[in-house]
Image (cartoon, rainbow, N blue to C red):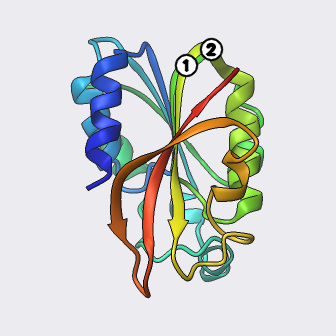
């Protein structure tokens, strides 16, 4: 499973502040915070209950939706702040420095590009930046996934991969800022 590489990256980096786009049910947040140093700040962004069948279709989302209040309860005991809404606005207004980024929100090229542009503004020079949704197989990567976006940067496609419903594979990418 590709997420093991993400958790190992947090363990290796020992970040002071993690930004996750696509908090969903909070599981990945808890996994990352459990290996991060004590006092690590977590910022989580998601549509949460603002998601609709239309946004699911536009973003190729197949997962269930969760309420921000319930996820905040799951994250009690951690220094965690959640932001509900479309990241094209919520992330655009965010201005805290972060040294670890996990982008796994919307799947459309437009949303991923917007999310990446916004996190690059707040990522410290030494930040580690990871993106999900690098696809191989029958998925149209001109519309979905980070494939065309990461080509503009020095990057590494991590070897861990998971099958995609309908065929193909999904992997993570580490982005390097040079």
Q: Position of residue 85 (x, y in %)?
A: 64, 53
Left or right of 63 in this view: 115 = right
Can you see residue 75?
no
Q: Secondary structure at mark 2?
A: strand
Mark 1 nearby-residue class (10 Å; few <14, some 14–19, many ≥20): many
Left or right of 105 in this view: 41 = left
Quarter of the image with the C terminus in it: top right
Can you see residue 29?
yes
Q: Which residue is mark 2?
A: 124
Given contact means CB atoms under 8 Å apart, are the residues at marks 2 and 1 in contact?
yes
Q: Which residue is mark 1?
A: 127
Q: Give me the residue at 25% from left, 38% from top.
A: 31
Q: Give me the residue at 60% from left, 82% from top.
A: 53
Mark 2 nearby-residue class (10 Å; few <14, some 14–19, many ≥20): some
Q: Secondary structure at mark 1?
A: strand
Locate residue 94: give its quadrant. top right
In the image, farthest residue toward the bottom = 166
């Amino acid at each position: 499973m590709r997420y093991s590489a993400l958790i190992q990256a947090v363990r290796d980096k020992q970040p002071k502040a993690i930004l996750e786009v696509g908090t969903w049910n909070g599981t990945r947040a808890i996994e990352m915070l459990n290996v991060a140093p004590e006092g690590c700040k977590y910022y989580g962004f998601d549509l949460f209950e603002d998601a609709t069948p239309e946004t699911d279709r536009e973003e190729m989302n197949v997962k269930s939706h969760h309420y921000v209040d319930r996820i905040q309860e799951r994250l009690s005991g951690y220094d965690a702040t959640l932001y509900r809404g479309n990241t094209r606005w919520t992330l655009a207004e965010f201005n805290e420095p972060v040294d670890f980024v996990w982008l796994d929100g919307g799947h459309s090229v437009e949303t991923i590009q917007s999310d990446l542009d916004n996190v690059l503004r707040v990522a410290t020079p030494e930040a580690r930046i990871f993106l999900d949704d690098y696809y191989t197989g029958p998925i149209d990567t001109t519309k979905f996934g980070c494939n065309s976006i990461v080509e503009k940067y020095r990057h590494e496609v991590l070897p861990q991969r998971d099958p995609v419903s309908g065929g193909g594979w999904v992997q993570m990418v580490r982005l390097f800022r040079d």
